[in-house]
Amino acid sequence: MMSPAAETLSDDVAVLRALVLEAWVERDTERAEKVRLVAERDRLAEQNDRLRHFIRQLQRMQFGKRSEKLDP
């Protein structure tokens, strides 16, 4: 017994080729989006690290011992 999807699948090679090409385009689009999102995540993580470092410097300037304070 064939699955419902197999029953509706065309026997026309051109139609099947178009479906495969469409699936490849969708796959490639999703991969590109994933790469973009990973790059954006990495950029934001780097920015967060810089901001945390900046906050620590400001806290040392405000609350640190006089010998630990940074130059203004």
Image (cartoon, grey):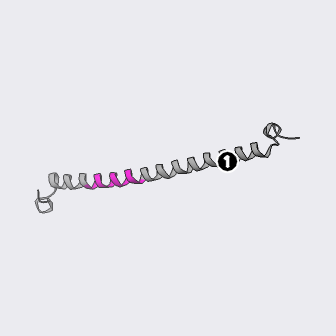
Mark 1 neighbour class, 10 Å CA radius: few under 14, some 14 to 19, many 20 or more:
few
Point out residue 57 in the picture as x, y percentages from the top left corner: 21, 56
- Amino acid marked by disc 1: Leu
Judged from this view, the residue extending furthest toward the front is 14
Point out residue 71 in the picture as x, y percentages from the top left corner: 11, 59
Point out residue 18 in the picture as x, y percentages from the top left corner: 70, 44
In magenta segment, residue 20? no
Name the dominant secondary structure of the magenta segment: helix
72 with respect to 51 (left or right): left
Point out residue 59 in the picture as x, y percentages from the top left corner: 20, 52
**Residue at x-position 33% and y-position 52%:** 47
Magenta residue span? 42-53
In magenta segment, residue 52? yes
Classify residue 3 by image quadrant: top right
Residues 21 and 31: in front is 21
> Callout 1: helix, strand or loop?
helix
The quadrant of the image that shows the N terminus is top right
10 with respect to 41 (left or right): right
Q: Which residue is mark 1?
A: 21
Answer above or below: position of 15 versus 64.
above
60 with respect to 44 (left or right): left
Judged from this view, the residue extending furthest toward the bottom is 67
**Residue at x-position 66% and y-position 44%:** 22
Residues 22 and 37: in front is 22
Residues 48 and 25: in front is 25
The quadrant of the image that shows the C terminus is bottom left
